[in-house]
Image (tube, rainbow, N blue to C red):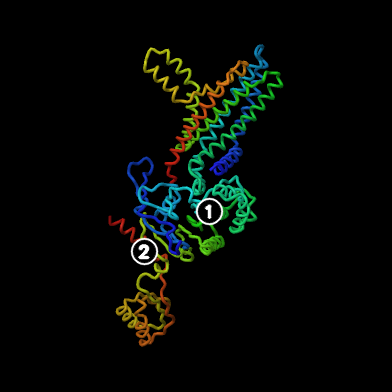
Amino acid sequence: MSASAEIVRVDDLVKDVRPGFGLRKKRILDGISFRVREREIFGFIGPNGAGKTTTLKVLMGLIRATSGAASILGHDVSEITFRRQIGFLPEQPYFYDYLTGREILRFYAKLSGVSEEHRERRVAELLELVGLSASGKLRLRSYSKGMLQRIGVAQALVHDPQVVFLDEPMSGLDPVGRKEVRDIILRLRAEGKTVFMSTHILSDVEMVCDRVAIIVNGRIRYEGAIDEFLDAGEPEADLVFANLSADAATRLEDRFGAQMRGHGDRIEIRIAEKDSSAALRLALDAGAEVISATPHRVSLESIFLSKVNEADAEVGSR
Amino acid sequence: MIGRIWAMAFNTAREAIRNKLLYTFLFFALAMMLFGTVLSALSYVERERMMQDFAFGSIRLFSVAIAVFVGVGLIHKEVERRTVYTILSKPLSRAEFLIGKYTGLVLIIWLQVAVMACFFAGVSLLLGAPLGLTHLAALALTAVELALVVALATLFSSFTTPLLASFFSCGIWLAGHLTRDLRDHGANSSSALVREATAWMHRVLPDLESFNLSLEAAHQLPIAASDIWFPALYGAGYVAVILASAVMIFERRDFR
């Protein structure tokens, strides 16, 4: 498989449901399409109710799409045998709580076709990986939410899959646990695996994902490399001055369309990066003191929120 | 495939064996058998027959109760608790999942029938009541009937709530024990519609009386090999049809 091989392919996927006994259909997925490439960490982000979990359930064969196509590793998602090569962690997973951590992993290993000779070693490795070696003999009913999430990650990896699907993998974890799961995700990529991660925790996405897709109201609003995404639009710079006269401030505002914010005796302005030299000259000539000049990095959160707002405005105008 | 079904079956059996309901019904079944023994001691005639009749009735009734009340939650619970998400994301078909769950529960119910049968044999030996192959055949056919009842509970559990599933399962079990009588009474009716309707009911609903050899066992009546093999094959066929229907329904379900 080439480096850019498509591991997950979703084309024009539609899912309609009829809530309760109603006759009216509700469209959960509205013709979504995206690709996940080999050896990448793909972030699937969107607000609650956007259709993230529904998409994952279609990919896992848990629900059927109304129309469209979805395939993983070239296999239609309705097939069974290729699932030996995929792992899945659902959102807020629930396991048989009468089993111990070791027993549940053994059970999933059996279902996944891990041979008896490798099973025990694999279970021990995974308990070690998720930091539950000491709790492997305890029943799951005594596990905390974070421990259950870790067991969930372990069961998704028990058969050493090529592609791993994680639905809100950081949910219920403390900062240390989140860091550990992030490290596991990065390690999976280093091992040549592909990770599909659905989440609404944007800081995690910024830290680990190579590419993202934003889904809002059942539609994909953006898909692409996270760096391109963050660098989209005209670059801006933040300049901080002291002793900036009112006259100079007005001129900066008029000439460069600068946005100003005052912090005590200091004034922070945000302008287009291309205008920063001219703005600095103007301010220095007016007797201002330059405290700092830094390129402004757009946060994923602000872009994400703008996409959500765009989608809401679109819905409102219909 | 067998390995995956067995993994599901083993786990289901492990879950069922932790179910307190199982022990409650088992306790009541054994208590009823003891009560039958005490009651038969008060009788002047046919004490052994009375005790064995009571015991067979208890075994059947409480085993069916376990089959229904544990069986109706078999699939529903997995969907409600969302354990089905992780299981069905593995290379396991929905048919393997369902058959595995069914097999696990049937094995546990057969195990508790074996426990009741041992108790029954112990009491019979203690009282000097006759024990023979007919008793074994009666218990074996009870086991077939229970496999059928678990299949019914599994079918209903695959698409409805435990409450409705237990209502439907109990209803069919009761009707299944009455269809033969209904057909015979219907045959004497002057209305062609009643005759046809009762005959069709007997054909469609399971004829559960064909699994009942308790009378023959208690009275030590002779039975032919066909009295065992025919109901056993009929039961196996019926179970196959019910499970195939359950798989068809379960395959079409969306786990939202």
In which chain is the residue bearing label 2? A
Please determine whether, in this image, residue A264 is positioned above or below residue B211.
below
In which chain is the residue bearing label 1? A
Q: Secondary structure at mark 2?
A: helix
A74 or A55: nearer the eye?
Answer: A74
How much space separates mark 1 and mark 2, taking CA atoms? Answer: 34 Å
Residue B115 appears left or right of B149: right
Q: Most extreme residue toward the left, as rendered?
A: A318
Q: Decide: few, some or many residues near mark 2? Use Cα within 10 Å; few <14, some 14-19, many ≥20.
A: few
B84 or B70: nearer the eye?
Answer: B84
Res A145 seen here: no
Q: Name the disc covering residue B181, or none.
A: none
Q: Residue at x 40, y 59 (%)?
A: A35
B126 or A85: nearer the eye?
Answer: A85
Q: Are the residues flagged by discs 1 and 2 in contact, CB closer than 8 Å?
A: no
Q: Residue at x 59, y 41 (%)?
A: B10
Please determine whether, in this image, residue A269 is positioned above or below residue B16.
below
Res A89 seen here: yes
Are dots 1 and 2 on a single chain?
yes
- Residue B37 point in image, percent of width and height: 66, 20
Q: Name the disc covering residue A306, or none.
A: 2
Which of the two marks, 1 or 2, is nearer to us in this view? 1
Q: Secondary structure at mark 1?
A: helix
- Residue A314 point in image, percent of width and height: 30, 58
Q: Quadrant of residue A259?
A: bottom left
Residue that label 1 marks: A156
Please determine whether, in this image, residue A147 is positioned above or below residue B94.
below
Residue A203 appears left or right of B48: left
Quadrant (top left/top right/bottom left/bottom right) for the C terminus of chain A: bottom left
Disc with the residue nearer the chain's start (1 vs 2): 1
- Residue B151 point in image, percent of width and height: 51, 33
